[in-house]
Amino acid sequence: QVQLIETGGGLVQAGGSTRLSCALSGRTFGSYYMSWFRQAPGKERVFVAGISWNGRRISYADAVRGRFAISRDSAKDAATLQMNSLKVEDTAVYYCAAVVDTMAVVSDSEHSYDYWGQGTQVTVSS
């Protein structure tokens, strides 16, 4: 069974930076599109950023474009979310998600994804 393990997160000052990582392990097949979603208290889970298996297709939510950067490691089995210029409204639980990559993946729909990480808290202080 495929599992996604998230690391990183914690408390960071507004205007600062932090980084999340998501490692894919288990009984994997093919290559995976990987994304980050987030959920703030009382809000629905929303798309943040996604990246294709080879890094050639990248998508960002409007709220984070220009501040966050998603990338893949050299083995293409992990995704990193670099979070810069953080705002208080970025405070949320961040979830990694993955699905076998096809050109038909709808990156910003949580229904596209078969596998999810455990979630990690990012808190941005004012």
Image (tube, rainbow, N blue to C red):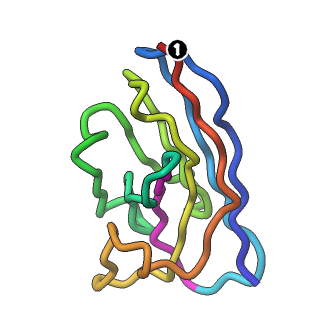
Q: For label 1, count other residues whose C-alpha is less than 10 Å away and answer few (under 14), some (14-19) or many (20+).
A: some
Classified by dominant secondary structure, the portion drawn in magenta counts as strand
In the rendered image, residue 13 lying in the magenta stretch gets the answer: no
The magenta segment:
30-39
- The reply, left or right, for residue 19 in relation to residue 68 is right
Residue drawn 25% across and 40% down?
A: 65
Q: Estimate the x, y position of residue 116 in percent, counting from the top left.
A: 62, 69
- Residue farthest toward the left in the current orientation of the protein: 62
In the rendered image, residue 35 lying in the magenta stretch gets the answer: yes
Above or below 39: residue 116: below
Residue drawn 39% across and 24% down?
A: 87
- The reply, left or right, for residue 85 in relation to residue 72 is left
Q: Estimate the x, y position of residue 110 in percent, counting from the top left.
A: 43, 73
Q: Estimate the x, y position of residue 30 in percent, counting from the top left.
A: 56, 84
Q: Nearer the viewer, residue 4 or 41?
A: 41
Which of the image's four quarters has the N terminus? bottom right
- Amino acid type, callout 1: Gln
Above or below 16: residue 121: below
Location of residue 12 by image quarter: top right
Above or below 6: residue 44: below
Q: Nearer the viewer, residue 83 or 40?
A: 40
Residue drawn 72% across and 58% down?
A: 5
Residue drawn 29% across and 82% down?
A: 103
Above or below 117: residue 39: above
Give the residue number, with chain letter if any, for mark 1: 13
Location of residue 90 by image quarter: top left
Secondary structure under the numbered disc 1 in the rendered image: strand
Q: Estimate the x, y position of residue 8 in percent, counting from the top left.
A: 67, 38
Total labels drawn: 1
Q: Nearer the viewer, residue 100 or 88?
A: 88
